[in-house]
């Protein structure tokens, strides 16, 4: 049983799609952000505020390394986990990496009510999303497969993943 790893920007649907996909396949579900919160006893926002982004990125790398050797999981990753080369390589070693793509406009619509997004606590979140996406797309594009989630419901994204020949 191969693992399936979902990457993509915040609001791309990684967690909801991951949970639904895990149910459909009979796999277990893991969320790297939740693993970090459990390990540290702090929310992602608290880690960013108290320790900074670089400390959070170190925790992400550690969590991914600890996942080597597992099988039968759907793994939802944090949106920035791919910005480190070693993380991309580790993810590819443990399973099929799928990039859930979404436009900046779709992302802002999906997360507009979320106050727990530390990288978007700025005056113009849409511009921040565009900026971060332009930086991260080169990393996301290294996934094995990409699926555009714009205009799709969770079950439609799950159906797209289940129809992949690489599963």
Image: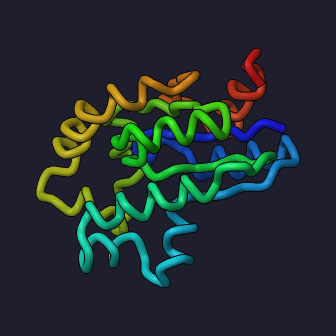
Front residue of 32 and 123: 32
Using residue 92 as the reference point, say whether residue 132 is left or right of it: left
What colour scheme does the image use? rainbow
Quadrant (top left/top right/bottom left/bottom right) for the N terminus: top right
Q: In this view, does 104 lie to the left or right of 6?
A: left
Residue 66 x %, y % = 60, 59
Residue 29 appears in the picture as rendered: yes
128 is higher (above) or lower (below) than 95:
below
Q: Is residue 135 above or below residue 115?
A: above
**Where is residue 27 shown, x and y percent of the image?**
82, 49
Q: Which residue is nearer to you in this view: 130 or 86?
A: 86
The quadrant the C terminus occupies is top right
Q: Which of 30 and 17 is in front in this view?
A: 30
> What percent of the width, then of the height, locates residue 128?
19, 46
Instruction: Please name the residue shown 34% across and 72% down the image.
Output: 45
Residue that protrudes farthest toward the bottom in the picture: 41
* Residue 73 in picture, x, y percent from top left: 75, 49
Q: Residue at x 36, y 68 (%)?
A: 116
Question: Is residue 146 left or right of 18 when viewed as pictured?
Answer: left
The structure residue drawn at horizontal position 46% and vertical position 52%, both measured from the top left corner, is 78
Q: Does the rendering let one see residue 110?
A: no
């Amino acid at each position: 049983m191969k693992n399936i790893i979902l990457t993509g920007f915040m609001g791309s649907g990684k967690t909801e799609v991951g949970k639904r996909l895990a149910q459909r396949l009979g796999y277990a579900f893991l969320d790297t952000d939740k693993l970090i919160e459990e390990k540290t006893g702090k929310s992602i926002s608290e880690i960013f505020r108290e320790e900074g982004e670089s400390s959070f990125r170190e925790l992400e790398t550690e969590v991914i390394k600890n996942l080597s050797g597992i099988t039968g999981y759907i793994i939802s990753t944090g949106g920035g986990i791919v910005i480190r080369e070693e993380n991309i390589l580790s993810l590819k070693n443990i399973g099929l990496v799928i990039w859930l793509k979404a436009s900046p406009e779709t992302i802002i619509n999906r997360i507009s009510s979320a106050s727990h997004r530390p990288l978007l606590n700025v005056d113009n979140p849409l511009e921040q999303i565009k900026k971060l996406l332009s930086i991260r797309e080169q990393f996301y594009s290294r996934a094995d497969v990409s699926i555009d989630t714009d205009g799709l419901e969770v079950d439609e994204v799950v159906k797209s993943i289940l129809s992949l020949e690489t599963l």
